[in-house]
Image (tube, rainbow, N blue to C red):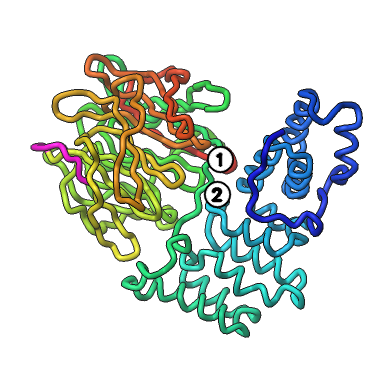
Amino acid sequence: PGRIERKHSDKDNKPVMGTGPSAPNLAALVLSPFPSSTPLTLIFFLFFYAKRLHPKNCLGVRQFAETMMCAVLYDAANSFIHQHFVEVSMSEEFLALPLEDVLELVSRDELNVKSEEQVFEAALAWVRYDREQRGPYLPELLSSIRLPLCRPQFLSDRVQQDDLVRCCHKCRDLVDEAKDYHLMPERRPHLPAFRTRPRCCTSIAGLIYAVGGLNSAGDSLNVVEVFDPIANRWEKCHPMTTARSRVGVAVVNGLLYAIGGYDGQLRLSTVEAYNPETDTWTRVGSMNSKRSAMGTVVLDGQIYVCGGYDGNSSLNSVETYSPETDKWTVVTPMSSNRSAAGVTVFEGRIYVSGGHDGLQIFNSVEHYNHHTATWHPAAGMLNKRCRHGAASLGSKMFVCGGYDGSGFLSIAEVYNSMADQWSLIVPMHTRRSRVSLVASCGRLYAVGGYDGQSNLSSVEMYDPEADRWTFMAPMACHEGGVGVGCIPLLTI
C-alpha cells in the first residue's frame, strides 16, 4: 500500500473488471480474512496481478488498486496497460471509460504501439461506441494524438476521409496541420513538441543478444548468445555464418540483423538476419560499402548505418536499409568522418556522438532529421571519446565508456535536449572501450569492452532512478567487442 499519483479520476463512471470477480467482490475476497494493512494481503495482491492481469481486466484491476490504495498493484496494472495498449483498447472496459481517462491514456509517452495510427483507431473506436454522446469530444481527442507521426497516406486515405472528421472543422484543421508536417518541413518547429515526439514503452523487458566480437586472443567470432535480464542468465544461440567483430546490430520486426564488421582479414559489406523463433540466420542484401565500427540504429522501421571504417579511412557516408525491399540506399552523409562513434535514436532523430577520423577523437555531436535528410549540430559531450556506448532511455540520451586518446574510460554522461546540455552521471565500475550499451525494461546494460589490458566479458546494469551501476551475469562465450541488440519479449 502507498500513495498513488493520478492526474485524472472518475471512480463513479469506471467499469469493473471484464473477467473474473467484480471489483467489489474481489475486494471482499481478498480482504475478508485479513486486515487491509497486513503483509499477507499485499502478497495476495502481488500474486493476483502477476497471475491474472489481462487486456480485458487490467483497467478494472487498476481501479481496484486505486480504491484499495495499493500502489504496487496500481503501477503494475499501468505498466501492463502500456505494454498491451492495442489489445486493451479493444476491450469493453476501454470502451466504457470516461473521456478524461481516455485522454490521459492516449497522451502517454509509454504506450507500446507500432505506429501512431493504432492510437488513432483506438480513440475513434471509443467515440463510435457512443457516437451521439461522444462525437463532440473528437477534437479534444485528436489534439492528444500525434497525428504528424502518421503516414501521409494514412492521413489522406483514412483520417481525412472519416465522416466524423470530415464534419468537424477543428478536426480538419488538425489533419491539415499533420499533413503540413510532411509537406512543409519549415513549419515543424512551430508544432507542440509532444505532438511529434515518438512514443517509447520503456517497461517492456527484452532479450539482449551479444553478436560476434572477440575472444581472449583477439580473434573475430561468429558466436551469438542471449541474455535474459529477468533471469540474469546467458544462453548460447546458433552462430552466424560469418565471423564478425566491430559489427553493427539492429532489430526490426522481431529479427536481429548483423551488419558488416571485420572477419579478421577483411571489412565486410554482407548482412545476415537472425530469427529467434527458428534459431536460424539468413543472408539478406549487402550494403553499398564495406565497413566496420559503424553506428547502427533503427528509425521508422528502417535500418541506418552511419560512418565506420572501410580498411583505409574513416567514413562519413550513411546508408539506410528497407526490410520490405531488401535494398540499401545512400542518404545524406554526416558533416564529419566518424569511426567508432556512438549512435542512437533519440526523440525521432539519429544522434551521432564522438568517434574519430583517424587523426583526432571528437566530443562533437550531430543529429539527422530523416524527414528533411539534413544533419544538424548539437551540444558536444563533456569528454571526447570513441569506441563508447550510446543509448536512449525515455526522455534522456546516455553515453558511457570509450577511449579519449590517453586512457580508457568509465565515465558516463546524460544529455538533456531541452537544455541542449550534457552532464555527468555516476561512472561505471569498470573502464570500458569497445563497449555496447542497450536499453531494456527501463534500465541500461553496458556489455563487454576492453579495459586497456584485456577484453571483458562482464556486464553492468544502470538504474537511472537510483543513478547506480550493478554487475550482472557475465557473458559466457565472448570476451568483449560485441554488437548488441534487444528484441522485446512481446514480439517473440
Residue drawn at (37%, 43%) of the image? 397
Q: Residue furthest left?
A: 359
Residue 109 in picture, x, y percent from top left: 53, 52
Residue 40 in picture, x, y percent from top left: 79, 23
Residue 50 in picture, x, y percent from top left: 72, 33
Quarter of the figure with residue 332: bottom left
Quarter of the figure with residue 136: bottom right
Residue 429 in picture, x, y percent from top left: 35, 20
Residue assigned mark 2: 110
What amino acid is found at the position of numbered circle 1 in the picture?
A: Ser
Q: Is residue 418 left or right of residue 62?
A: left
Magenta-highlighted residues: 358-364
Residue assigned mark 1: 203
Earlier residue among tags 2 and 1: 2
Query: Which SS does the magenta portion mostly show?
Result: loop
Residue drawn at (88%, 44%) of the image? 24
Residue 290 visible? The answer is no
Q: Are marks 2 and 1 in contact (CB under 8 Å)?
A: yes
Residue drawn at (76%, 26%) of the image? 43
Magenta stretch holds residue 123? no
Magenta stretch holds residue 360? yes
